[in-house]
Structure formats: structure tokens, C-alpha cells
Image (cartoon, rainbow, N blue to C red):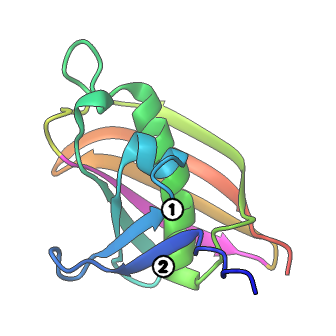
Amino acid sequence: MSEAAPAFFHCAPHPDHPGWQLYQLSGPERYNRAVLGDLLVRAEDDSHARVRLAPQPWHANSTGRYHGGITLGLIDVALFAAMYVLRAVPVSGSVTVDMQTQFIGAGDAARALDCVVELLRETRRMGFLRGLVVQADDLVASFTATVRKPQS
């Protein structure tokens, strides 16, 4: 008898952050955890979710700001976290169809970075989303995106 395969994805209440869930892929060698680290996620209402990135030294560019690649990576992963917490859309098998991003301000890499995602519309196969990347009242980026849900 073979062992059961480890769960690929984990999302459960975070014991140290009431109201937030820990959102992570199972292996520390996977992109999400290796580059972004463990993320926090919560639904804010029926169509909005917030995904929080804790700062890590490797997230910063030479000026102490978040590297643009980290911001883009956070947005991409946040799309799936939002679809999961808002509509229970499976993460595995979902793909980004397109994403447009506008960098508006520099994110201070010593502070947490939040991605606030709004689910505009969901069809049988797609999710249409938009949102902002923020640090408190400071605007870092805006985005729109389309996600294709996994085949059933």
C-alpha cells in the first residue's frame, strides 16, 4: 500500500492572526513559499478579498522598495487566493489568462504589502477581477485580470 500524496495546497485559520487564513502551497521549494513566503488571506465581503505579504529581505530592490517582480507575483497568486476564499474555486488547475498592471507608487519593503482583490464577475469557466496593491493609505499598484477555472 502506498502512502497518500501530500496535500498540494493549504488554507486554514492562522493561529496568530485572528480573522486571517494561512494560504500556502505544501512544499517550501514551490514558488509561492520559496519566493513570496507564507501569505495571509481573508474575505472582506462577498466580492472582495485581501491577501497580505509579510516583508522578507529578498523582496527588496537596491533602494529598499519592493521589487516589481514581487509585486507582480503577489498579484498573480492573490487572484487564486481570492477566487478560493470568495467562491471555493480550486487553486490547482486554475490559470491566469491575462493580467494588466499599473505601478503607481513604490512599496516600502519593510512593511507588509496588501493585495485587495475584487471579483467583478464569475462565469462557469472564468473569473474577472481587479484590484489594488496597498500599504495602509499608500497606493502601490492597480490591476485587472482574468482567471480560467479548472476543468470539472
Image point (19%, 21%), residue name: 64
Q: Quadrant of residue 44?
A: bottom left
Count residues near mark 2 (Cα–Cα under 10 Å), then give few for <14, some for 14-19, many for 20+: many
Count residues near mark 1 (Cα–Cα under 10 Å), then give few for <14, some for 14-19, many for 20+: many
Which residue in the structure is indicated by mark 1? 25
Image point (43%, 43%), residue name: 34
Whether the magenta-drawn stretch holds residue 53 is answered as no
Residue 95, position in %: x, y? 72, 56
Name the amino acid type tagged 1: Leu
Extent of the magenta region? 112-123
Image quadrant holding the C terminus, namely bottom right
Q: Nearer the viewer, residue 108 or 10?
A: 10
Q: Residue furthest top?
A: 62
Which residue in the structure is indicated by mark 2? 85
121 up-or-down from 143: above or below: below
Image point (43%, 51%), residue name: 33
On screen, residue 111 versus residue 69, left or right, reads left
In the picture, the disc for residue 80 is none
Q: Majority secondary structure of the magenta segment?
A: strand
On screen, residue 151 versus residue 27, left or right, reads right
SS assignment at label 1: strand
